[in-house]
Image (cartoon, helix red, strand yellow):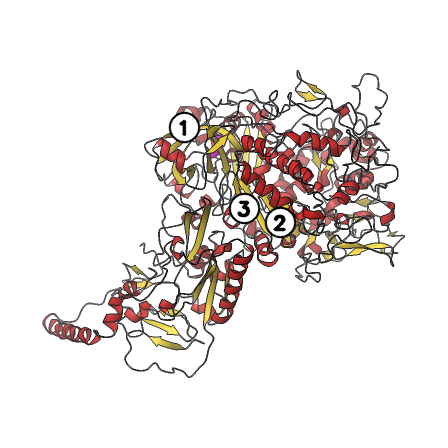
Amino acid sequence: MSQATLRVQKISGHAGSVPGEDTQRQYTVAKLIDVTTCIGCKACEVACVEWNDMPFSNTVFDNTYQTMPETRWNYWNLILFNEHEKDDGSLMWLMRKNQCMHCADPGCLEACPSDGAIIQYTNGIVDFQQDKCIGCGYCITGCPFNIPKFNKETKRVYKCTLCTDRVSEGLEPACIKSCPTGCLHFGSKEDMLQLANSRAKQLQEHSNYPNAGVYDPPGVGGTGVIYVLHDITKPEIYGGLPSNPSIPWTVKLWKNPLKWLGNVAMLGGLVGLFVHYLKVGPKAHDEEPDSREGAKP
Amino acid sequence: MTNGWVDIKNTDMMLIMGGNPAENHPCGFKWAVEAKRVRNAKMIVVDPRFTRTAAVADLFAQIRAGSDIACLGGIIRYAIENNRIAKDYLLNYTNASFIVDPKFKLPENDGVFSGFDTEKKSYDRATWNYAGAVAPPPKPGQPPALPPLPEKVEHDPTLQNPNCVYQLLRKHYSTYTPEMVERVTGIPKEQFLKIADLFTSVRKDGDTKKVATIIYAVGWTQHSFGTQIIRTAAMLQLLLGNVGRAGGGVNALRGHSNIQGATDMAGIFDNLPGYLKVPTPADIDFAAWIKRITPTPSKPAQWDSFNYYSNTSKFAVSWLKAMYGDAATKQNGWAFDYLPKVDRNYSWVQLWDNMYNGIIKGVLAFGMNGVAIGPDSQKNIDALKKADWLVVGEIYPDETSEFWKAPGTSQEEMKKIQTTVYRLPCAGFAEKDGTFTNSARWLQWKNAALPMPGDCRLDQAIVAQIFLKVRDLYKKDPGKFPDPILKLTWGYTTPTSPSLAEVLKEINGMTFVDVEDPATKVQLKAGQQLPGFAWLKDDGSTACGNWIYCGAFTEAGNLTARRDPSDPSGLGIHQNWAWSWPANRRVLYNRASCDLDGKPWDASRRQVWWNEAQQKWVGNDVPDFKADSKPADHMGPFIMNPEGVGRIFGPLGAFADGPFPTHYEPIESPVESNLLHPGQLHNPVVKKFKTKDDKFGAPKDYSVICTTYRLTEHYHYWTKNNPMNVQLIPEPFIEVSAEMANEMGIRGGETLKVSSARGSYIAKAMVTKRIKAMQIDGKKVYQIGIPIHQGYRGIAEDEGKNARTLVNLLSPAVFDPNAYTPEFKGFLVKVEKVEKV
């Protein structure tokens, strides 16, 4: 991904300080998704597939308008459709655009053991660097939103980049550009929060949604994707949006109190590898499959 | 649309019914969302299913497919009973106060208006008129002519006369009570009252500032009484004073990017370009034709009427000059004899019936997939088997060009089919330039984005070459009457492939002589493009291919290519973006946005107004009015009607099935007696065909209501060839309610066979809470819905992944008697579980 105008502020699996840390101030960017005006048209899904040059996915009918059950390594942006019956018996058909939330405290990055495979830029975008990915899948465990997906052929993990390549050139992400109703917005986190809060207030006062609110969960330090929901007290009705997401305790343990244990284990592993090398010799070079082509999940 | 897409942002209230814009017009729907977000506008959605539009609505009600008039009639009754009407507007801008012929009779239990002939199943519309009309003296050997509208109309400004339109309206809808609405439509009374109250709340306590819009699409047109549903909406909007105003109107959302253009350019057999009525055999010469199609003013004596159609002869002569050039002269009645005279109904369903009966021998099929479109696809397939030839211009192999191998056709049968099929590779939309006319009547020029692949040709090149070949044949062997072909103007730079810019110039029109406008002193030289239709003449000095498009391509250039987004008024008028017919006017009838004195009803949404100092109408939009008509002259704002006012009562020949809409059941209905008119179940003038493929089911055999529709993810029968669309919705499905599924033991993903009296459709079940069982007059009724998009040619189809059936194998070949649209919504089926696709 283009890093031309982006500065890194967090690096996975990295010992010591981040180069250039605090040398530059930058707005934190955010996507605002106003779920109350999403019409589930899937323009954002198509824009994501097309901008990122993804192959077409095989899908099957699953008793829903939803394209597929969950995001895939090559399908990063998925609208989740849910029929919800309110207490008064009336129906809501909820459509929530699901993708990487770009957490301020990213569980994936915390969990990742590979130096630099996951980085967070100073603008808040969390980005996977597949060339440094070792395919361990720890990021998948670390994510409270079930977003990163493993490609069995490339043995690497993928997810939404928040279009770093576009954002670094001053453009909005592809999904935002494609949205026909204006339910998607992009800008500084500060501006998006302000917009989101005023929309939530409008919904409370004028649209009979007294519980309307903004989803920006503090358990992960806030997110780079925020939602306006009709009912902030029940995020789980929107396709299982966690009400209080946090980094799993296993990840926290592994990264902090038990890290020395991991290091010991890793050292043991390295010793084992060295012994293996002495005995067997170097591994023959495999042709690296192209992550962009053909591979089906 | 009376208004436009962007204008929806100006509304306070939306009734979306018979349309699903969030799914079928997502880009235009942004303006509905904008109205909600910026103005706190309310959105009411009434639909047989809880759609993606319903998902963002403030109020939703599930309606039984085909009962819309009952619901809208109920709202009209509610508005009258609760005084939620625009009194001044109603009195002065509609025919509410006009006195109707005392012999006119409303339909009561018998369900028919006065003049119905039960034998012929048609109406003598003599009494569908205002009082005082006089029949012309009968001509020997001809049937008695209808009395024209009276020149002077009696009216009662107190609206108390029992024969005035308002009182008739009130009486007619007095039976459409909330209880009756519930019994007929299945919308619970409380829910209906919420809708009626919310929608009419724009006129609460005498408010005249607020505006409501009604938005619809083919969910209203595709019924055997579709035109009358739309009329009910128009009447409601007139009653509430919402027509002509920013954020108001009656707004049809067109389902193709250029379907508005198709109708503007004579896409229907009984229209010529610009909605001029086609000549019939009774029009013996040009003068007789013009006399028949030119209305004369009909209004209260003290009012004024512009009666803009008094200019019809100018539009007609200029059109004939565009067609036949020098060959159209005053002496030969402007080549009137060259025009074919339409002697019968040549509408879509009728054409296929004619082909089925061996009358039509060949078809040129461009830009449409007749077999898939249906209705009653099997009848269309059987009709093509009887044709001599079929030419299909398409970008993909489609169901029509492969009708001969439709599923179920045996090898033996295929051998017997003698139809010669020519398949021509055409250019796709992105490979062609030209204009699209959108729902808002904007003509927008587009450039070709891509070169055509392989041997593809432009549609106009194919049509031109066919024409030139036919002309050559007529030159060699003139036969009895070659002139209509030989004299046709064809002055394009490249005759074998006319440039569409040249065609647009020709449509706009030009003057053959030097001319000066006496008012503005603007001068035109001979050969120059006309600036607008006010310049058209009936002396042969102007040519114009379509009077309503005159002004689109002037001496200033191709105005449809304009892309200036500026909008000084903030009302979304965008005067210099593309070009809108008529006269670049964005909201029709906009004189009605002002009160009697010419002041806008709402000062914050000023479209046009009377400028006392200049003594003329001015504004942000182009005034749709006689520019110098003083408010005191009381000229009506509906200048295209001879009355000058909006028609709550549709007199004379305006409609085939009644001056007021009334509820009839769809041709196939679970209701066996019309609750509102026990004596008449269906629209009495609807025709049923008689071939072996025209079968109709009774509720005892087919108890489930079926409606068909489109999905955001697909475009008609086209995108099943595009993997991007196929991945989004990979398979056909049938939406059934959870309650029905439960009763039948169906789970989502299991395979269903849906059958009507005409055919079967097989696909997987989508079990949903978004359709619910309904109570219709105390009886439980189920509705199902089927998207139309799949067939027997496409990616999934060719891979054998679905049953390769067409939805329109189910639908009946009956149509609305006014617009000839088939009844794709609300027919009867039965549903069975089957083993696999």
State yes or no: discs 2 and 1 in contact (Cβ < 8 Å): no
Q: Position of residue B376 (x, y in %)?
A: 51, 29
In the rendered view, would you say A8 is above or below A197?
Answer: below
Q: Which quadrant would the N terminus of chain A be assigned to in this image?
A: bottom left
Which residue bears the numbered disc 2? Answer: B13
Q: Secondary structure at mark 2?
A: strand
Crowding around mark 1 (Cα neighbors within 10 Å: few <14, some 14 to 19, many 20+) is few
Residue B805 counted in the magenta span: yes
Rendered position, B681 above or below A283: above
Name the chain letter of the residue that bears numbered label 3. Answer: B
Give the residue pinned by disc 1. Answer: B408
Q: Earlier in the sequence, mark 3 or mark 1?
A: 3
> What secondary structure is the stretch in magenta mostly built from?
loop
Q: Is residue A45 above or below residue B62?
A: below
Quadrant location, the C terminus of chain A: bottom left
- Outermost residue, right direction? B518
The residue that mark 3 highlights is B59
Under mark 1, the amino acid is: Gly
